[in-house]
Image: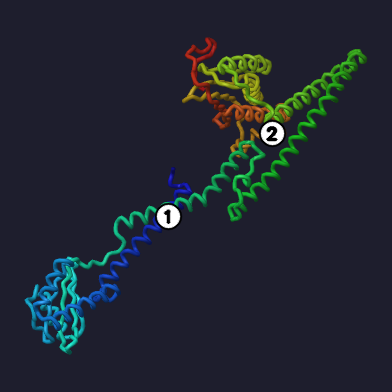
Amino acid sequence: MKFRTLFLKIFLYFWLAAALMIGSQNIIYLLTVSSDPNPERRRGAFGEALNLYAESAVQVYDSEGPGAFNEYADRSRKVAGSEIDLFDAQGHPLTAPNSDEAASVASEIHATHEHVSHMTSLGRLTWGREVVTPSGNTLIFVTRLRQPYQPRGIPPLGIAVAILAAGGVAYLLAFYLTSPLKKVSATVRAFAEGNLEARVSPSLGNRRDELADLGREFDHMAERIEGLISSQKRLLADISHELRSPLARLNVALELARRNTNGKAEAALDRIEQETERVNQLVGQLLSITRLESGAEQVPPEKVVLHELVVQVVDDANFEANARGKQVKAVHLEPSSLMGSYELLRSGVENVVRNAIRYTESNTAVEVALRVRLGTAVLTVRDHGPGVPDADLQHIFEPFYRVSEARERSSGGVGLGLSIAERTVKLHGGSLRAENLPDGLLVTIELPLAGSQQTAQAPANAEKMPV
């Protein structure tokens, strides 16, 4: 998954933010605790326990004497690991002090008359305070805890668990936010590929947020576009079908006119026949493009030997081009085959070649080449004509698009041949593009090939020269 995806960005940013919050809170906690000179106050119950501990030890000494206190101190050392010492009000030891630190704490308490706590570098706590005995004497109690008091934040394992939990929440949040966008993207892709019935709302469930609103707006737009395109296709198909009948009657009337005029209006009748044939071809092209755009034309799963198809198209087109003082020749052919419709592919390639014949200069040749590149057949058709303005290259495959009215009228084209070729190529999973060369136009068709390629030699009549 690339980092540019919105899902990964949301997931990582939220997770990083949660991890920083957890870490910063732990650091603030440690800094706050370490700066507290009296941590036992902050610890509440622990401080109260130390006070009870001090009063209990002083009461044993005052009521039962030093011997009982020593036994009490030994038990405390063995059971709790704590060392306790008693000093008089002036800070003089009443028992053998366990450490110099205890005597230092007692002197400090004598001077300040406040309880004191010291923390060693290892985190061991020494704590002391003045205690008034039942008999009214003031003694200083000092204890040194064996278990070090060390302010701790969240332990490392707890931090790891918290960060993992934050990662899980961030993942769910990112998934919740981006899953509708993925559904919208998939629907838009399907719509762009020709599935005009693709809609977003069914996949969003009961969501009522802004993303659901976006999906509903897209569905509304898709319905409008589907209605407009469907109306256009129906109109085109209806007009094409309706024109067939009058054209047929016109042809019959034309034959009757030839018989009755005795050759006196032959030139006019020939002109009528020529224009009728053009209209008939236009109707046929309209019906073809309507079938391709509506999805009614399906690609049968049959094997097409592409280089043989190209040879046949070149031979037929060359026969037509010779009558105009032009040529069509195959300059390079590599054996290749694919799964698809022979008739559709032949029509598509033939339309591209015939378009090149229209615009190539007299005494020049339209050059056709077929090469295989990484499992793809690359068919190029090059003419030696005036080319196409760069601004129009993106539009020449649109139905009825004309680069120049005068140019199309003189060539006899109506702007459907390349449109049919483009839709035929896309129907076979390929692509078609055009580019200008210094002395003509180059149209490139790319088609995915079948799984295995034949190793047969190219036809002998194909010249081996680059385009």
Alpha carbon distance from label 2 to label 1:
48 Å
In the rendered image of this protein, does residue 230 appear above or below residue 439? below
Residue 243: image quadrant is top right
Q: Can residue 106 be seen by looking at this rendering? A: yes
In the rendered image of this protein, does residue 168 appear above or below residue 139? above
In the rendered image of this protein, does residue 70 appear above or below residue 289? below
Mark 2: which secondary structure? loop
The residue at 93%/15% (across/down) is 260
Residue 68 location, x and y as percent? 11, 77
- Quadrant (top left, top right, bottom left, bottom right) of the N terminus: top left
Q: In this view, does 436 lie to the left or right of 420?
A: left
Instruction: Indicate which disc, 2 or 1, sits on the residue closer to the N terminus.
Output: 1
Tell me the amino acid under the disc marked 2. Answer: Pro
Q: Can residue 442 be seen by looking at this rendering? A: no
Tell me the amino acid under the disc marked 1. Answer: Tyr
Q: Mark 1 points at which residue?
A: 13
Mark 1: which secondary structure? helix
Q: Mark 2 points at which residue?
A: 399
Point out the residue furthest to the top here.
460
Residue 325 location, x and y as percent? 65, 17
Marks 2,1: beta carbons within 8 A: no
Residue closer to the observer: 323 or 335: 335
Residue closer to the observer: 201 or 297: 201
Residue 99: image quadrant is bottom left
Residue 160 location, x and y as percent? 33, 54
The residue at 44%/44% (across/down) is 2
The residue at 60%/42% (across/down) is 187
